[in-house]
Amino acid sequence: MKKSLIGLGLACAALGASAEAPRVRMYANVGYGFGGQPLIDGIWVNSSNQQTGTWDIKTGKGVVLALGADVRITERLSLQGSMGYETDSVEGVNGGYKFSRVPVELLGFYSVTERFRLGGGVRKVQSTNIQGHGDAEGDHFAYTQSGGAVLETQYFFSEPSRTGREPLFGMYLRYIRESYQLRDQQGDKKDGNHFALGLLFYY
């Protein structure tokens, strides 16, 4: 009995010593996009009906959030899928507009070093809408996206663990190439090409 317990303990120790970093990690990011072409625009006026400036909502501007999973294929190659939420808004005294969309992405990454990765892939944006409220209540614009491409660089603040599951934080810079068009209408496409910068998390 004692020998069995000793053997079991040695086996567990051996398994622990040979533990590897997980092949599947949870992924999340938060960032901000900037650039693109205005979808709608207007002029700010004050209570005296004087113009005080201009405003617009652009195809690539706004807060970016995403959740997904990263699968390690080889020591240096991985595949990452995610679903996100991107939003921007303008707010006036009497109302405003909110722009929202839901991107789905599939990217591949190559680890150049332990802390630096390069990647790229495709994305498709769903539920792209501009919704008015207040005095703009009832204004609604729906868009379709042609399908897009993504190039991304990632930098980790520490080296990924090779012996187990540990939190990993870093930052990213990406370039997105895409276009938008009003749904069910013929017309010029809006350039959606833009950059995004933010923080990322793996576990």
Image (cartoon, grey):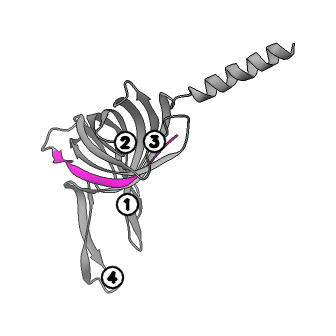
> N-terminal of the two: label 2 or label 1?
1
The front one of 56 and 28 is 28
Q: Residue at x 33, y 82 (%)?
A: 46
Kindly check if marks 2 and 1 are in contact, taking CB atoms under 8 A apart as contact.
Answer: no
Q: Residue furthest left?
A: 188
Q: Position of residue 117 (x, y in %)?
A: 31, 41
Q: Name the chief secondary structure element in magenta.
A: strand
Q: Nearer the viewer, mark 3 or mark 4?
A: 3
**Tag shown at residue 114:** 2
Neighbour class for label 4 at 10 Å: few (<14), some, many (≥20)?
Answer: few
Q: CA distance from mark 2 to mark 1?
A: 38 Å
Q: Residue at x 23, y 37 (%)?
A: 148
- Residue at image mark 1: 89
The front one of 173 and 64 is 173
- Residue at image mark 4: 46
Q: Residue at x 50, y 32 (%)?
A: 21
> N-terminal of the two: label 3 or label 4?
4
- Residue at image mark 3: 160
Kindly check if marks 3 and 2 are in contact, taking CB atoms under 8 A apart as contact.
Answer: yes
Q: Can residue 98 be seen from the camera position used here?
A: no
Q: CA distance from mark 3 to mark 2?
A: 7 Å
Kindly identify the amino acid type of the residue bearing the numbered disc 1: Ser
Q: Residue furthest bottom?
A: 48
Kindly identify the amino acid type of the residue bearing the numbered disc 2: Glu
Kindly identify the amino acid type of the residue bearing the numbered disc 3: Pro
Q: Is residue 35 magenta?
A: no
Q: Position of residue 94 (x, y in %)?
A: 41, 71
Neighbour class for label 2 at 10 Å: few (<14), some, many (≥20)?
Answer: few
Q: Nearer the viewer, mark 1 or mark 4?
A: 1
Kindly check if marks 1 and 3 are in contact, taking CB atoms under 8 A apart as contact.
Answer: no
